[in-house]
Image: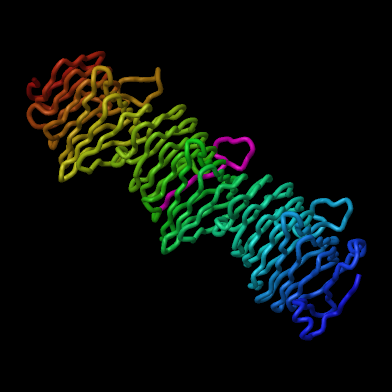
Amino acid sequence: MKKHFLLLSVLVLAAFTFTSCDLFETEEDDEDYLSTPEELDGETITSNVIWETGTYIIKGSLTISGGGHLTIPAGTTIKFESGGKIVVTEANSGLTASGSADFPIKFTSVSNNASNGDWDYINFTSTATGNSELSYCIIEYGGGYATSYGGTLWVEGAKISVDNCTFKNSGAHGVVCEDDGYFNSFTNNTLMNNTLYDIHIDGNYAHTIGTGNNIEGQGIYMNGDVIEQANATWLLQTAPYTIDGSMHVNASGGASLTIEAGNTIQFTDGSDLRIGGDGNFGTLKAQGTAELPITFTSSSIQKDYGQWDYIEFETGATSNSILEHCIVEAAGGYADYVGAIHIEDSYVSIKNTEIRKSATYGITVNSEAYFAECTDNNIHDCQSYAIQIAGNYAHTIGTGNTYEDVLGIEVYSGTIDQNEVTWKAQTTPYVLTGNLRVESSSASTLIIEPGSTLKFTDGNGLYIGAGDFGKLIANGTQANPITFTTAAPSGGEQPGQWDGIFFEENTLSGSVLNYCSISYGGGYADNYYNGNINLLEVPVLLPEIKNCTISYSSGWGIYSDGSSATLENNTFIGNNLGDIGNKKGMMQ
């Protein structure tokens, strides 16, 4: 073995080998080179240095600073004693460790009985602006500095390329990128047997994790953050992304997060994903496939109700936002009035998505929000309603949805003031928890599809043309009637548990109840003047009521203040005051 102290000479420059202080280059002269490793203790590199292939032992801190750059060739082994580390700092300083598939570079423990956390880390600080690269490296048994949050590779505010490397047996995380640190490239790496997560990275830079990685441990960890990228994609990995805290996707000029099919996004207790908000704009595109769905779930091994909060589309969430072929489970932990998915003052598409084990609702939609599309979803095992939505936008719930072990679709109070809307038949009831009015100055029409069921809670009813102009078309069929009834549990139905259907003075021609079942209403007033159906100053012969079963009213089956509707082939059963109560005139 020979040591050559470096001189500032033309010869040295030609050799591309530079050091400062007492650093050296080494040459392999014989086969027993590795039996006499070189030791470095507290050295600093401030110029361009190329090591020759061999074995090096780092006792303390090897610092690369002042524009220095260290190049480590293929086949080299760097061993660290306890507390050993490489730190790259200051402008234009860097580290290049380029191995090969046959001759990787190894960063490891000096111990013959190595264990996780034997040495500290390789660190790139925010001032390390030089080009740094690790390729075909094996980095093992580090992460001993800060075992609760550190990593074997620690990138703080810098950027680095890491390809074809193996990170294993860290005493903490495998790789940490923080303070806006990220990857120029991160591909074809293997991460395994690390004590904490394989990668810890800011959410705003998780998209810099590339393809071809084999992540065998706990996966990718992200603290709460704001994703401000115009177009960021979380690429498919072999382990989950885990969000700890609140992850926001928004920017004044618009931010967009795309999640590739097949990914799993986990949330710790109390965590969430929010799109838009804070006066900014955001887009979420989570489009899985039937074979590769995207799963949003709890980080707990056993999935249970309410273990994380929600996915929220806030004001500023764009209409391009979509959940398709997704699974959303174990959410609803924020509050009993917010679902696993919450839509606030925006409109989004949710298709072919399964929502399960919510501690509250499946989906909640505020009064100014609605669905761009809501089709072919499966919502089940929620501890409240499948969907909560305002009456003016219940028509945006589309077709092909299935429901199981839910209370139904909650439609809270409001006015349908759109020209014409259709409530599609669902496999679960619409449950009206407030009065619903159909009216507007330009005339509004509510069409209810055959086979639909509308249930009403105590004190609520359906009002047509009560102020402005309105029309109801409930045109069922003999095979698929439309049901209007109480929301009381099965077996607990009693007359008067909801107020009834009210046709009033601005009811429009074409209003019809055909092949409908109307039961357990008449609760509007505890006197003579009420019924399951109420006709109050409606135009002559409106509405048409035919082929209906009208039953178990606490008042009349039909009550009229003298208005004359068109009645045909109706059946009356068990109404307390009788079939028809008529205050003034005659009905035909």
Please tell me whether residue 360 is drawn above or below residue 124 in the rendered image. above
Q: Is residue 267 magenta?
A: no
Q: Is residue 526 visible?
A: yes
Instruction: Locate the C terminus and report the quarter of the image it occupies.
Output: top left
Q: Magenta-highlighted stretch: main secondary structure? A: loop
In the rendered image, the vertical position of residue 159 relative to residue 166, given as above or below: below
Quarter of the image for residue 37 reads bottom right
464 relative position to 37: left or right: left
Please, is residue 482 above or below residue 83 in the view?
above
Q: Position of residue 129 (x, y in %)?
A: 63, 72
The residue shown at (84%, 64%) is 54
Residue at x 22% of width, y 28% of height: 474
Tell me the quadrant of the picture where the N terminus can be found.
Answer: bottom right
Question: Colour scheme of this structure image?
Answer: rainbow
Decide if residue 451 is on the left or right side of residue 125: left
Magenta range is 298-314
What residue do we see at 56% from left, 43% from top?
A: 264
* Badge count: 0
The x and y percentages for residue 464 are 19, 35
Above/below status of 435 relative to 548: below
